[in-house]
Image (cartoon, rainbow, N blue to C red):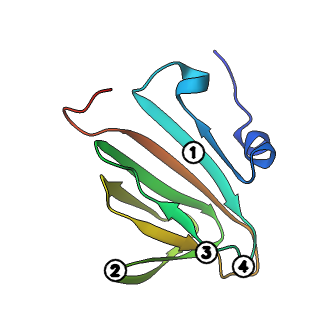
Amino acid sequence: MVIYNVSDLASEHKGEYVLGLEDLHTHACYLIYGFMKPGEKGRVLKPGSGHEEIVCLVQGKVLLSNSSGRFVLDQGQAFHLKGDETYMMDNEAGTDAVYMISGGHSKGHGH
């Protein structure tokens, strides 16, 4: 078993770290750990073709937007994205926002 300090890794990689193929040596799944400073904008959430993700806000409050509208995501809330579905995430709050994204392949997809 290997324990990864994803918080430190995110700090070393400009606020976001993908625990995936490079560390795990598998295409089956990945975990993204990231944070956004107050006022930080423009984090793109998009799994991509053949992939799905669950986005969970661990700390803070963020604004999500796409062509369907604008939505607030509060601490402890999560949502599911599939394929090319895209949202922009902005931290308009006065505190850091911390998020985790778990992802993997949609049914029938492989590399």
Instruction: Identify the residue position indicated by label 1 in the image.
Output: 32
Secondary element at image label 3? strand
Q: Distance between the residues labelled 2 and 3?
A: 20 Å
Mark earlier in primary sequence (2, 3): 3
Q: Position of residue 35 (x, y in %)?
A: 69, 59
Residue at left 57%, top 45%? 32
Q: Nearer the viewer, residue 33 or 58?
A: 33
Q: Measure the alpha-carbon separation of dots 2 and 1.
A: 24 Å
Q: Which amino acid does label 4 sit on?
A: Gly
In this rendering, the answer to whether 111 lies above or below 106 is: above
Please, is residue 22 above or below residue 66 in the view?
Answer: above
Helix, strand, or loop for circle 2?
Answer: loop
Residue reaching furthest left? 108
Classify the position of the C terminus by image quarter.
top left
Dividing the picture into quadrants, the one containing residue 57 is bottom right
Q: Residue at x 49, y 35 (%)?
A: 30
The foreground one among 49 and 31 is: 49
Could you tell whether 62 is left or right of 85 in the image? Answer: right
- Say which of marks 3 and 4 sits in front: 4
Query: Disc 1 to disc 4, how far (Cα)?
Result: 21 Å
- State the residue position of label 4: 39
SS type, badge 1 = strand
Residue ranking furthest to the top: 1
Q: In this view, does 42 lie above or below 1?
A: below
Describe the element under mark 4 as helix, strand or loop.
loop
